Image (cartoon, rainbow, N blue to C red):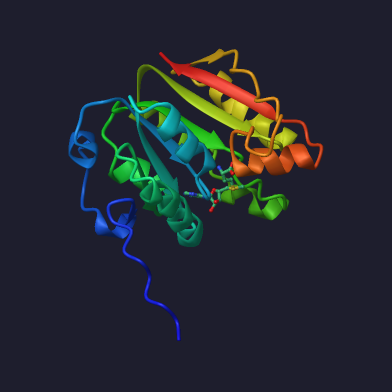
Amino acid sequence: MPQPAVDLHPYFTSLSEIQGGLDWTVVFGNDHPVELDLGCGRGKFLLDSSINHPETNWMGVELDFTEGRRAAKRLAKRELPNARVIGGDAKQFLTNQVAAHSVAAAHVYFPDPWWKRKHTKRRLFTDEFADMLSRVVKHEGFVHSWTDVGDYFEVISSLMNHHSDFIPLTPPPEPAGENDMDFLTNFHRRGRRMGCSIYRGLWQRR
Ligand SMILES: C[S@@+](CC[C@H](N)C(=O)[O-])C[C@H]1O[C@@H](n2cnc3c(N)ncnc32)[C@H](O)[C@@H]1O
């Protein structure tokens, strides 16, 4: 018999349960800076970041509820007060729930490449998405994006480097991969194991 889904509130919330804009001080109970992980997958970056940076609040957004709930379970197990996951479309979330210039940084790691030409319009990182990031990231805040797909990185860099609201910066170094956990995200580990180059981008909001 199928088991009823475990209640992961407040660690996992479906976007459909949220009415209107979010007030981060209500979500996290403090006014610490907020960073977003858009397409957080099963949450390695979210978990590591929330443990290593307790002075920051971390919000993951994940379209795939199985992956998003898996990420939320890892946060719930450690009772982390500074990380949450929202299940739903990051573009809808940015448009409807996130106040202008209310986040210190947005992270977009290994967004789905949608290899087939007829599917490229499904990619998360588009010019519309870059505009959404420009609206929600604070002045002097950051956008980080890594991928192992060279042609997608060219698109992302071109969008961000030519966006009048962003300045390209030198990205932080890549973890050396000295052990199985020494990776930024699950897809970073997968890409490195497959011998792929890792393309890294960092931009600052003007
Ligand atoms: C290739 S995986 C990378 C996951 C994670 N960032 C990592 O590096 O391991 C891309 C993730 O983005 C999610 N995703 C794709 N489109 C999305 C969207 N519009 N909103 C939120 N998540 C999305 C997918 O479900 C998938 O989990």
Is 104 above or below relative to 149?
above
- Horizontal side of residue 195 vs 46, given as left or right: right
- In this rendering, would 97 be left or right of 107? left
Q: Nearer the viewer, residue 11 or 170?
A: 11
- Residue 84 lies in what quarter of the image? top left
Q: Between residues 128 and 61, which one lies in front from this camera angle?
A: 61
User: In the figure, 57 relative to 13: above or below?
Assistant: above
Q: Quadrant of residue 37?
A: top left
Q: Is residue 164 visible?
A: no
Q: Quadrant of the C terminus?
A: top left
Q: Is residue 91 visible?
A: yes
Q: Position of residue 73 (x, y in %)?
A: 42, 54
Q: Locate residue 113, reporting x and y percent.
A: 66, 46
Q: Residue at x 75, y 37 (%)?
A: 192
Rendered residue at 35%/28% (across/down):
54
Task: Check the picture and name the quadrant holding the N terminus.
Answer: bottom left
| Residue sitting at the far bottom | 1
- Where is residue 6? Give x, y as percent: 36, 67
Report whether 166 appears left or right of 99: right
- The residue at 53%/44% (across/down) is 124
